[in-house]
Amino acid sequence: MRYFPKLKKEQLKLLVSCNGFEFTEQKNKPWFDYTSNQIGPYYVQSMAVFSNASASQSAINAMIEYINNQEMDIDIISAGESRDWPFAFPIQNHLGKDIKMLYKDGKTSFGTFDLKDKKILHIGDLNNEGSSIRKWQKMIQEAGGTIKQALFYVDRMENGVKVLEELGIERHAIVDLDNDSWQYLMNNGFISQSMYQELIKYWEDPLKWGCEKIIKHPEPIFELIKNEKKRERGIGIFELYNKETNGKLASILGVRDFAELLLKVSINKK
């Protein structure tokens, strides 16, 4: 993977201008809840670049420029439902390649083209925990092919990096959210120094950051469990960090387990 700092800086600025980031400092929140049942200090929404035509064109052009500079040898493009698709379709059209659309229910797009021995590039919006790319690789392999490379618009530089290594997929990204990125945002006034320090602590050890933060600020768990749409996530967060803190989180919340936590929330709601 070659490094293209100009592309990275341009797209970082673009994401900020499209409100693609949310930080705890700006939202006056101690932490954000993630679908992985972990907590963190920021959200990133890569799809924010599709808020206007100019921004989306810039993002797509950056990915095409990266592909051309890398001189990638590609036969077929794959892309998963559904946030990968807005990034993948323009790239497919520009390169003149067939595309394999991958659906969450395990189906793939119709097409008679053979995947065997083909050089497949997966286009993704965001690399996070790696659960999606693991699923997409399995589907492609069941269809007779193998994803050799993956290009993401944004990479959170978390567990998904290790998953790609395990799967033998060469990783590429336009925006790596690493120390350089956070420092660039701080130096250009997009985030404060204190927010930068929080991001670096999280980036170095997300689980440790989460344990320390949730012990200091456990209250949002109650709000998650009160919300029917987020109750399952709230329970998942409680169970993960209660285990990682050896029961300290339950003690702080005044319960023994998640069953008592649910009961406590139910009583308080009444």
Image (tube, grey):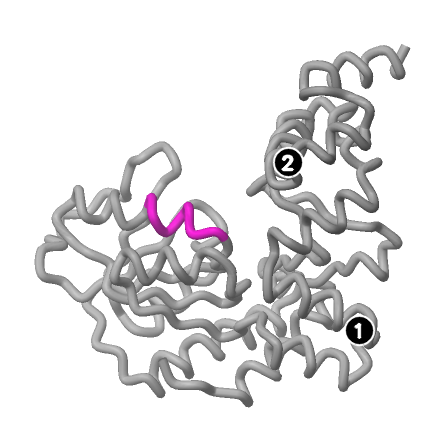
Closer to the camera, 188 or 18?
A: 188
Closer to the camera, 112 or 219?
A: 219
Tag count: 2
Look at the magenta stretch and give its main secondary structure.
Answer: helix
Percent x, y for residue 54? 62, 74
Percent x, y for residue 26? 85, 61
Classify mark 1: residues with Cα within 10 Å, few (<14), some (14-19) or many (20+): some
Residue at (56, 77) in percent of width and height: 58
* Residue 191: image tag: 1
Closer to the camera, 29 or 119?
A: 29
Residue at (26, 78) in percent of width and height: 72
Residue at (55, 63) in percent of width and height: 156
Q: Quadrant of residue 46?
A: bottom right
Q: Decide: is 172 above or below 229.
A: below
Residue that badge 2 annotates: 246
Amino acid type indicated by mark 2: Asn
Amino acid type indicated by mark 1: Ile
Q: Decide: is 241 above or below 113.
A: above
Q: Check if residue 133 falls in the magenta segment.
A: yes
Q: Quadrant of residue 120?
A: bottom left
Sequence-first disc among 1 and 2: 1
Extent of the magenta region: 129-135
Task: Say what secondary structure mark 1 lies in.
Answer: loop
Task: Say what secondary structure mark 2 lies in.
Answer: loop
